[in-house]
Image (cartoon, grey):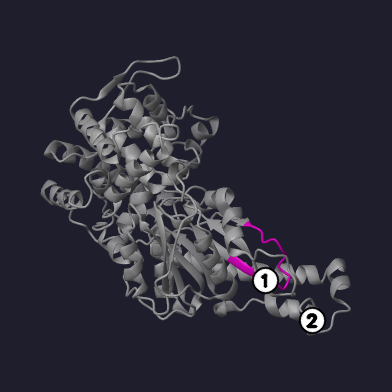
């Protein structure tokens, strides 16, 4: 658990991983090891990402053509892992006695709405998150498993990642030797000349464990870029192929403020109405012949109305009585900005129904997340706060602050005055998502657990191989300016801009971006400086 004090009886951490096997065996000269992935958060599950998206990511890094020259193409494993405290990695950080208690807390928090500018609204949210923080700290005093609270932050995760690289190298070597010593392996290699790529000698050479010369190939998205940037700073000579996709600045992670993250959010909202208008009523439910500016004005008036007078929704055969609030709509909006390709059509349907004073569809949308729960016999046997008392979700409310608040300095936002000043600063960047974004930092209220090992920089290094940095030109929470800034800290790195909207570049199809990603993993060659790739698709099916 503690890399700097391995003799202490603080227990160990079992990192959950999922490996998507390469399309060729480890003994094939085209096998080039593993690409580790992290989808962000903090708190998102890498194992879940590998199951859902592993094959697609593998297709982007692998060679595309059939092999014609032995050893000329490269094929990779994809390995997703759950960082400390997350999902299947144990011990998990659990600060609720069971899933039922967690859902009650979540429903109460949702009913309170997003943090408001009033002192009362801010104080309520502060008290709510302080209660969670105190619960986590109390568990750490009584439950040995909860000591993970002091070892959740990014620094030990980076060290875990280095360990995984070395363990994978050990496995690779053992797997190759096992095959070579098998009857099939002996038969396949016995007549090969020693300098042939498929000879026993060549296979041993390219699969041998190089120990501390093993390098990391990594694709980090969003918060995963913080992991990647920290790895490059801590172990610059162990960097292989490293992609930072949608960059979180280390300085903001350490400060715990996310101070300039949402500067492009409102422009993406504007694009929503532009695209909706261009798509027409057959593809966008909120379409109006009045034009995109009028549509946005209508939406703004709807938000103003809902903040004063929420929409009442009577019960149906499938949903209970509900209300649709300003917080509900802005929460749906904020989520949609992350992945416009998938989310904009449904967002249009949601706000269109509410604008017509029919909240049934939105109520169904809200209640779809309300998972029924019955305490299992395993939970009753294992006692409260046990993993068996939780559902194996990829996201838990306490993991995100457990990581981000442990990474950060005290951000000073635990007073109403300081928080309101911070909120006003964010509102100068975005009128639509400033409040929900500010609430992310409210999660550190009352969080006094400190990390045992915390790397604070410098976040700059001459890496053994150059880094490829990706960013959409319009990203709601990690602006392209972050990518440009971090590139200055890693000489030789290149920023590839994508002329897209949303968070995470590869969520929008771009043959240009995909070509440069594949080129990077296949040859190590970076795109030319100042390259911008166009996208091949737009939300609502709008013609590119």
| Closest to the observer, 383 or 246 | 246
Mark 1 or mark 2, whichever is nearer to me: 1
Q: Mark 1 and mark 2 in contact? Answer it, CB < 8 Å.
A: no
Q: Position of residue 219 (x, y in %)?
A: 49, 63
Residue farthest toward the front in the current orientation of the protein: 289
- What residue do we see at 20% from left, 25% from top? 309
SS at circle 1? loop
Residue at x-position 69% and y-position 72%:
173
389 or 34, which is in the foreground? 34
Which quadrant would residue 207 be assigned to in this image? bottom right
Q: How many C-alpha atoms fall within 10 Å of the one at disc 2: few (<14), some, or many (≥20)? A: some
Q: Which residues are magenta?
A: 20-34
- In the rendering, which numbered label is found on residue 73? 1
Q: Quadrant of residue 195?
A: bottom right
Task: Kindly state the secondary structure of the residue where label 2 is placed.
Answer: loop
Q: Which residue is mark 2?
A: 196
Q: Is residue 39 left or right of residue 476?
A: right
> In this orientation, which residue lies closer to the viewer: 240 or 246?
246
- Quarter of the image for residue 335 reads top left
Q: Is residue 51 left or right of residue 195?
A: left
Magenta stretch contains residue 26:
yes
Q: Position of residue 517 (x, y in %)?
A: 53, 66
> Which quadrant holds the N terminus?
bottom left
Residue ID at (45%, 18%): 318
């Amino acid at each position: 658990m503690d890399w700097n004090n391995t003799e202490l009886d603080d227990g160990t951490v079992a990192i959950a991983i999922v490996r998507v096997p390469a399309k060729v065996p480890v003994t094939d000269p085209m096998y080039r090891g593993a690409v580790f992935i992290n989808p962000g958060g903090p708190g998102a599950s890498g194992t879940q990402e590998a199951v859902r998206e592993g094959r697609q990511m593998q297709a982007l890094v692998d060679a595309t053509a059939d092999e014609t020259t032995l050893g000329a193409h490269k094929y990779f494993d994809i390995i997703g892992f759950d960082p400390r405290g997350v999902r299947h990695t144990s011990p998990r950080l659990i600060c609720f006695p069971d899933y039922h208690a967690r859902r009650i807390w979540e429903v109460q928090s949702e009913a309170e709405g997003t943090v408001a500018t009033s002192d009362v609204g801010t104080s309520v949210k502060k008290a709510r998150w302080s209660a969670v923080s105190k619960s986590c700290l109390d568990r750490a005093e009584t439950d040995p498993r909860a000591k993970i609270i002091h070892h959740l932050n990014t620094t030990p995760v980076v060290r875990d990642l280095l360990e995984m690289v070395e363990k994978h190298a050990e496995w690779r070597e053992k797997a190759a030797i096992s095959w070579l010593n098998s009857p099939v392996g002996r038969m396949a290699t016995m007549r090969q000349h020693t300098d042939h790529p498929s000879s026993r000698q060549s296979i041993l050479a390219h699969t041998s464990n190089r120990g501390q010369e093993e390098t990391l190939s990594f694709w980090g998205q969003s918060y995963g870029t913080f992991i990647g940037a920290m790895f490059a700073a801590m172990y610059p000579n162990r960097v292989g192929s490293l992609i930072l996709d949608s960059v979180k600045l280390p300085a903001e992670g350490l400060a715990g403020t996310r101070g300039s993250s949402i500067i492009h959010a409102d422009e993406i909202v504007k694009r929503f109405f532009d695209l909706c208008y261009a798509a027409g009523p057959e593809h966008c439910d909120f379409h109006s012949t009045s034009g995109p500016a009028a549509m946005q004005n209508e939406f703004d008036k709807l938000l103003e109305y809902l903040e004063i007078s929420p929409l009442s929704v009577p019960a149906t055969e499938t949903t209970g009585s509900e209300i649709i609030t300003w917080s509900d709509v802005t929460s749906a909006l904020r989520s949609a900005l992350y992945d416009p390709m998938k989310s904009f059509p449904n967002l249009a349907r949601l706000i269109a129904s509410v604008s017509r004073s029919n909240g049934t569809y939105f109520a169904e949308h809200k209640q779809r997340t309300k998972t029924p729960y019955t305490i299992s016999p395993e939970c009753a046997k294992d006692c409260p706060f046990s993993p068996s008392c939780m559902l194996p979700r990829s996201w838990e409310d306490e993991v995100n602050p457990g990581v981000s608040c442990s990474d950060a300095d005290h951000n000073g936002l635990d007073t109403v005055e300081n928080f309101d000043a911070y909120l006003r600063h964010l509102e100068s960047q975005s009128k639509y998502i400033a409040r929900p974004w500010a609430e992310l930092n409210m999660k550190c209220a009352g969080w006094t657990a400190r990390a045992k090992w915390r790397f604070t920089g410098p976040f700059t290094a001459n890496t053994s191989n150059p880094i490829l940095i990706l960013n959409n030109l319009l990203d709601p929470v990690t602006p392209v300016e972050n990518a440009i800034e971090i590139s200055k800290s890693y000489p030789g790195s290149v920023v590839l801009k994508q002329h897209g909207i949303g968070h995470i570049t590869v969520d929008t199809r771009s043959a240009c971006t995909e070509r440069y990603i594949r080129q990077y993993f296949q040859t190590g060659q970076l795109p030319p400086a100042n390259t911008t790739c166009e996208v091949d698709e737009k939300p609502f099916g709008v013609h590119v």
